[in-house]
Image (cartoon, coloured by chain):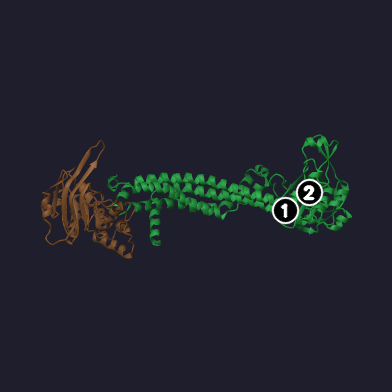
């Protein structure tokens, strides 16, 4: 089935990320090896919106960590922005995350002692960009997600939906090639979850590439393609990139 | 660059401010250490400055020869009721005629005597001296004149009173032209010296010297009127001694000649004094000893203060380790958002340096309060425990702390260094966390 995914690239679009035969083993004690990923090959085109689904233990978190350059595969390749990043060291991976990736987490993961504006600014800090233009960009992004009047609030003073919007603004601030979302609506009620999904939809329409892990089918329905994982393999890919 | 640094410092302050008590205690540890360094060094400097000042008063180009009462056994060997010891007038002549480097030689004889004006008495130190004594001891006049060569030549019955003696004997009137009685003789007061601070004992060979209860008369007068024999009643028994001169102060022309002159004088006198009844004191030597003492003292103080800073540093490390554990998730977030391990190290190191630097700055501030604090404590003790204060030696009573610039620089530098050293381990621990694990941390 994985061949299907590889064989179904968008006709004209640029490929922003491609994984080939990606494997990941975890070594537990007593020579127990957990084979979390057993050879996954996927391509992601620019402007794609892909949902990754699967039951717990299917390897979707492992795949997201690898795609997010937070971890290195046991074997296989990961091409991001035209280069193989699967063997880079920690420092280089930090640089890749900083330049090409944006993260949205289930539990928002804002830094509680920083204000909204400061939270959005964090990724820029690690690019060494503290120009006034960058600060302007943070304000614009906060306005984009509807929090232009909450710039100096602390995360604890915001609702869950508002916090997730801050996280989205933060994921956009470095103008990433890919936005990685890990159960972005998992901690939210349905109505708020829908609001968040509308923002993601809008971003995708504006040309953003989004990879999202979810286990809710109606959330996955927002994506163009859904990758179903099972036991560390791609079981099925439904839909097609537009 | 500077802006970025300012921002990092501000962020450091912010996260430390979240735990005011915890950060405050860590700062306190460093603060106490730094303040301790500055205070201890300031006190040490104050004491040694006092000592040096007194030694300088003695004159670096001087060699002081003093009569010393020999131990009891050897004194009995001489037999007789009156025990002769100490420098002789012949010694004075011998020194002056035999040692070519000497520019000036000032003999002096001192005895305790009761001085009387009608019904007022003072137990004063009667000093028989020459006019040179005045300049040699940095005395100043408040009234009249000091002794002159003419007084000495004629062995006149004239006296110069020191400030305190004058105040006791003549509380309401001008002592000039009045007479005081010493033994059965009357002396005309011709002058009065201004108050002069006492000099403390230095190195054991020189006793503490107070000047304000002195009465000065010509050396020749003292010889003719009172003589060399001194009778003292001590616990029932009477003791007599014969002393011709108490002290000879020799001044040489050049600093390099001091040691040599002292050696010559010692050799010369040893021939005529088989008993150890004299001492040669070289202020220059004392100065060198005092400076060495000060250096050793300072090393010791810095060591002690260093230990307290070390303890402060361990406190900081403890707190930073707790902070790192507590902020594991934040570390994970920052790593996911592109922070390198170096960035994380920098962040936590900045925080520890902010902690220790704040402690250091506050410590320097409190360090400057040393002088008012010492004065305050002294006044307070003087009011609550006047007896205890009175029993303290004068060099502690008059102690003026002197803040040494180097101690401020060293103390602050060490405090920042402590922050860096003790912050490095927690910071590295934070940086080497697995970002995935850190993100999952609750």
Question: Which residue corresponds to the image point at 50% horizontal and 45% vertical from the top-left?
Answer: B308
Question: Does residue B181 appear anywhere in the picture?
Answer: yes
Which residue lies under the disc numbered 2?
A: B247
Question: Does residue B196 appear anywhere in the picture?
Answer: no
Question: Which residue corresponds to the image point at 24% horizontal and 40% vertical from the top-left?
Answer: A27
In the image, is residue A219 above or below residue B83?
A: below
Nearer the camera: disc 1 or disc 2 = 1
Q: Which mark is residue B135?
A: none
Q: Quadrant of residue A50?
A: bottom left
The local crowd at label 2, few if under 14, some if 14 to 19, many if 20 or more residues have their Cα within 10 Å, is many
Residue B425 at x, y percent in the picture: 39, 46
Residue B280 at x, y percent in the picture: 74, 47
- On screen, residue A130 versus residue A65, left or right, reads right
What is the secondary structure assignment of the residue under circle 2?
A: strand
Q: The brown chain is which one?
A: A
Which residue lies under the disc numbered 1?
A: B258
Residue B17 at x, y percent in the picture: 40, 51
- Same chain shared by disc 1 and disc 2: yes
What is the secondary structure assignment of the residue under circle 1?
A: helix
């Amino acid at each position: 089935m994985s061949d299907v995914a590889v064989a179904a690239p968008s006709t004209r679009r640029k490929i922003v990320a491609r994984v080939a035969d990606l494997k990941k083993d975890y070594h537990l004690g007593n020579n127990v090896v957990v084979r979390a990923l057993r050879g996954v090959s996927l391509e992601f085109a620019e402007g794609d919106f892909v949902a990754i689904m699967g039951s717990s233990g299917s390897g979707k978190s492992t795949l997201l960590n690898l795609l997010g350059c937070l971890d290195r595969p046991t074997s296989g390749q990961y091409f991001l922005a035209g280069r193989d990043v699967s063997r880079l060291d920690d420092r280089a991976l930090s640089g890749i995350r900083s330049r090409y990736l944006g993260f949205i987490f289930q539990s928002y993961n804002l830094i509680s002692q920083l204000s909204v504006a400061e939270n959005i600014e964090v990724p820029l800090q690690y690019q060494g960009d503290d120009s006034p233009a960058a600060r302007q960009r943070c304000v614009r992004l906060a306005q984009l997600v509807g929090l232009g009047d909450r710039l100096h609030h602390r995360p604890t003073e915001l609702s869950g939906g508002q916090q997730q919007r801050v996280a989205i603004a933060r994921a956009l601030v470095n103008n990433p090639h890919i936005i990685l979302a890990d159960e972005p609506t998992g901690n939210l009620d349905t109505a708020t979850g829908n609001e968040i999904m509308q923002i993601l939809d809008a971003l995708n329409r504006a040309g953003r590439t989004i990879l999202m892990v979810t286990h809710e089918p109606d959330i996955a329905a927002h994506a163009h393609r859904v990758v179903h994982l099972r036991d560390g393999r791609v079981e099925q890919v439904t839909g097609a990139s537009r | 660059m500077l802006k970025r640094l300012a921002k990092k410092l501000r962020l450091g302050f912010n996260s430390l401010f979240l735990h005011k008590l915890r950060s405050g205690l860590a700062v306190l540890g460093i603060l106490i250490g730094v303040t301790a360094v500055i205070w201890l060094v300031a006190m040490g400097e104050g004491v040694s400055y006092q000592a040096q000042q007194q030694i300088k008063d003695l004159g670096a180009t001087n060699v002081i020869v003093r009569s010393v009462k020999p131990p009891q056994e050897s004194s009995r060997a001489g037999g007789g009721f009156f025990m002769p010891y100490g420098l002789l007038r012949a010694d004075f002549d011998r020194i002056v005629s035999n040692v070519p480097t000497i520019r000036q030689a000032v003999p002096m004889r001192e005895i305790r005597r009761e001085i009387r004006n009608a019904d007022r008495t003072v137990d004063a130190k009667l000093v028989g001296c020459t006019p040179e004594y005045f300049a040699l001891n940095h005395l100043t006049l408040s009234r009249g004149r000091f002794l002159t060569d003419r007084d000495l030549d004629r062995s006149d019955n004239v006296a110069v009173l020191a400030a305190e003696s004058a105040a006791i004997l003549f509380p309401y009137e001008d002592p000039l032209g009045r007479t005081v009685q010493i033994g059965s003789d009357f002396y005309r007061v011709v002058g009065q010296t201004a108050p002069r601070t006492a000099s403390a004992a230095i190195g054991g060979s020189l006793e503490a010297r107070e000047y304000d209860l002195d009465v000065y008369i010509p050396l020749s007068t003292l010889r003719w009127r009172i003589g060399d024999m001194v009778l003292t009643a001590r616990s029932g028994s009477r003791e007599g001694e014969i002393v011709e001169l108490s002290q000879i102060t020799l001044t040489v022309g050049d600093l390099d000649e001091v040691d040599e002159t002292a050696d010559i004088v010692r050799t010369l006198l040893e021939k005529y004094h088989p008993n150890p009844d004299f001492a040669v004191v070289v202020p220059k030597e004392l100065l060198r000893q005092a400076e060495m003492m000060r250096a050793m003292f300072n090393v010791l103080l810095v060591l002690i203060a260093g230990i307290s800073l070390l303890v402060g540093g361990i406190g900081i490390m403890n707190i930073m380790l707790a902070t790192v554990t507590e902020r594991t998730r934040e570390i994970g977030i920052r790593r996911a958002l592109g922070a390198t391990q170096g960035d994380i190290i920098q962040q936590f190191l900045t925080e520890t340096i902010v902690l220790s630097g704040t402690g250091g700055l506050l410590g320097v501030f409190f360090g400057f309060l040393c002088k008012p604090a010492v004065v305050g404590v002294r006044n307070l003790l003087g009011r609550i425990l006047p007896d205890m204060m009175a029993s303290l030696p004068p060099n502690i009573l008059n102690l003026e702390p002197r803040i040494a610039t180097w101690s401020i620089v060293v103390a602050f530098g060490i405090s920042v260094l402590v922050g860096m050293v003790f912050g490095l381990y927690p910071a590295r621990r934070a940086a080497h966390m697995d970002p995935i694990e850190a993100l999952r941390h609750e």
